[in-house]
Amino acid sequence: MRLFLLFVFVTLQGCSTAKHVRLYDGPAIGQDQEVQLVLPLSFELISLDEQPIAQFSQTFRNHDLTVKLSPGKHTLVMRYRDIWQIDADNHQTLSSGQMTFTGEFNSGESFKINTPLLNTLAQAQQFVKQPQVSLVSDQQTITGSHIKKADPLTFKQDENIEKVTYPHLKQLKFWWEKASEYEQQQFQQWLSATP
């Protein structure tokens, strides 16, 4: 068991030390040609050009992550997600809906994510409802569009529900009233005997 726990700790420690991730095929094109995006700890890159990004290298990190892209037109989809401490015993996880950034990324450009100040839980709660986020470099600013996070399903009363009717009930009442006392007793005995 100790060996297993040591293995898990070493694995997680190794995962959390990756500070650079390259998201283009082929050999490295060099830092002067690459586009770099500094991804803060509270942001996840979900997809690049409609290709999903593996979350493993983003999940166990404890630092910013530099994402290296090839130059050209790209569409990036991200999400804000962070854990906020409410008090000594309680925490709240906040996450936004998806944010999409589309633009022309130039060789050697380095982007940082620009958000409003998020110093308090109240600021973060307001931010996740309508995040104002942009990617900023020395050359340009790319503003993201926010897709509102879907609300959980809730039960809603349907006003158009038709009243349930039992067509045979009317017939049963009719025949019950027509039946003699003996027939009603026989019918009740039959009801109690049927499983």
Image (cartoon, rainbow, N blue to C red):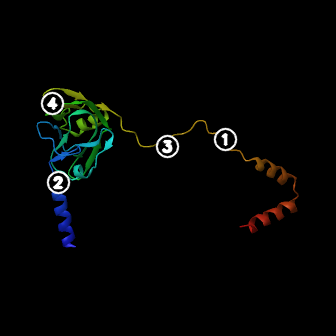
- Local packing at callout 1 (Cα closer than 10 Å; few below 14, some 14-19, many 20+) is few
Kindly identify which numbered label has been placed on residue 137. Answer: 4
Give how far across and how far down residue 6 sits, in percent: 17, 67
Look at 29% across and 37% down and name the residue there.
128
Residue 48 falls left or right of residue 12: right
Mark 4–mark 3 contact, CB under 8 Å?
no
Callout 4 secondary element: loop
Tell me the CA gap for discs 1 and 2: 60 Å
Identify the residue under disc 2: 16
Callout 1 secondary element: loop
Total numbered labels: 4
Q: Earlier in the sequence, mark 4 or mark 2?
A: 2
Residue 100 falls left or right of residue 21: right
Q: What is the three-letter code of the residue carrying label 1? A: Lys
Tell me the CA gap for discs 4 and 3: 46 Å
Q: What is the three-letter code of the residue carrying label 4? A: Ser
Q: Earlier in the sequence, mark 3 or mark 2?
A: 2
Mark 3–mark 2 contact, CB under 8 Å?
no
Give how far across and how far down residue 187 sits, in percent: 81, 62
Look at 25% across and 51% down and name the residue there.
90
Identify the residue under disc 1: 163
Tell me the CA gap for discs 4 and 1: 63 Å
Q: Quadrant of residue 116?
A: top left
Callout 3 secondary element: loop
Q: What is the three-letter code of the residue carrying label 2? A: Ser
Callout 2 secondary element: helix
Q: Earlier in the sequence, mark 1 or mark 2?
A: 2
Identify the residue under disc 3: 155
